[in-house]
Image (cartoon, rainbow, N blue to C red):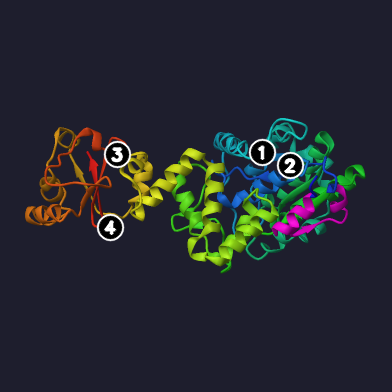
Amino acid sequence: MKNFVEELKWRGMLHDHIPGTEDLLKNGGVSGYIGFDPTADSLGIGNMVQVMTLTHFQRCGNKPIALIGGATGMVGDPSGKSAERNLLDLDRLQHNLECQRKQLEKFLDFEGENAAEIVNNYDWFKEFGFLEFIRDVGKHISINYMMAKDSVKNRLETGMSFTEFSYQLIQGYDFYHLWKQHGCKIQMGGSDQWGNITTGTELIRRLEGGEAYALTTPLIKKADGTKFGKSEGGNVWLDAKRTSPYKFYQFLLNTADADVGNYMRVFSIKGQEEIEALEAEHAQAPHTRLMQRTLAEELTSRVHSSEDLQKAQNASEVLFGKATSEALKSLDGETIRDVFEGVPQAEVSKSELESGIDAVELLAGKTGFLASNGEARRALKENSISVNKAKVNDQFRTSSDDLIAGQYLLLQRGKRNYFLVIAG
């Protein structure tokens, strides 16, 4: 059985832990949890650090508990925040909870001896009255103790509400509840959560004289110091509706050489020997981007599916001119739009495309892809025109079979000159 702390160490995923944590975890069989913030209806790729922490935790013979914060999501965690955020209503939170639950179920094993569990802290807070809470919980933690936390100190100048100030007490009680009701011995999280987590261990000690443990992982940043998980279009999400599998795949494929070794250790379930062998091979020929391709393939397949991975790879090959007509036609409409975002486009009547438009008219008159009928004829004669990645001549006419996803037609002159026809 692998030792969880040792596993995190070689992966570069260990930031801090309470003394005794290593002994607690050396033989497995421990219940531990991580909390997830339900302020969006999808986890982002940045959340994958904690998803993978639970995954490695379970693979080392422990029981993972994912806490989705229905109650804490209504309060707002001040950790790492420079200003108070808007609070969500119960219906929106419930929707977000269900969406995140489905994503977590892709990574954790919910059957067997160490079956994973998902809990919602709203279940034990919804009947907990305010007076009861401040009497039975609040009296055990001093104001001085709470003020010393970085999440509070960092906001003293700009100010914070009592709501956010009380957040660490609520998270602390979560740990106490899971310790008492679920036998949960350790809480894990990002390094910015250390203050909230240790409030929980302190509450367990003061309320019951019990022992509990804390472990944090480093916040993942790029080699240049910028935040991981952002693309030009904003956050990279695990939900295909927010970030398509193609864009997700491309985000990982474009990882810098300086970062890819770190990301592979954090996000892959491959073992140390396999990753080190990949690194050695990559170092011999970095231009092949072996590490980036391996990381993108593994994560896209796990977050989405092997079918989505194949579509993303087909789409990527389109850009480099290697895709076949069949591979192009396998793509869905959303992927087509993602791949050819920014490419010149024109809308043409769908009925006309289905009934048949000849090659010259399609290239010039209907789309303006080429400047004139004469230029279209010359290009066709030169054999430099492709429709859906297949070479065509002046005898070509469109039909309904040519429409990709029932809506798109890809024109191409040479290797890199693309034009997208949209059936309207």
Q: Secondary structure at mark 3?
A: loop
Q: Earlier in the sequence, mark 1 or mark 2?
A: 2
Q: Amino acid at mark 2?
A: Gln
Q: Which residue is depicted at the point 29% across and 39% down?
A: 404
Mark 1 vs mark 4, foreground winner is 4
Q: Amino acid at mark 4?
A: Lys
Mark 4 vs mark 2, foreground winner is 4
Alpha carbon separation for disc pair 4 and 3: 20 Å
**Residues in magenta, as a range:** 4-24
Label 2 Cα crowd, 10 Å radius (few <14 / some 14-19 / many 20+): many
Alpha carbon separation for disc pair 3 and 1: 36 Å
Alpha carbon separation for disc pair 4 and 2: 48 Å
- Mark 1 and 4 residues: CB-CB less than 8 Å, in contact? no
Alpha carbon separation for disc pair 3 and 2: 43 Å
Q: Amino acid at mark 3?
A: Ile
- Mark 1 and 2 residues: CB-CB less than 8 Å, in contact? yes
Q: Earlier in the sequence, mark 1 or mark 4?
A: 1
Q: Which mark is residue 415?
A: 4
Q: Which mark is residue 108?
A: 1
Q: Earlier in the sequence, mark 3 or mark 2?
A: 2
Label 1 Cα crowd, 10 Å radius (few <14 / some 14-19 / many 20+): many
Hey, which residue is sitting farthest bottom in the picture?
A: 224
Q: Which residue is depicted at the point 28% across and 54% down?
A: 343
Question: Which residue is identified by label 3?
Answer: 404
Q: Secondary structure at mark 2?
A: helix
Q: Is residue 80 visible?
A: no
Q: Amino acid at mark 1?
A: Leu
Q: Nearer the viewer, residue 171 or 112?
A: 112
Compared with 398, 254 (above or below) is below
Does 7 appear in magenta? yes
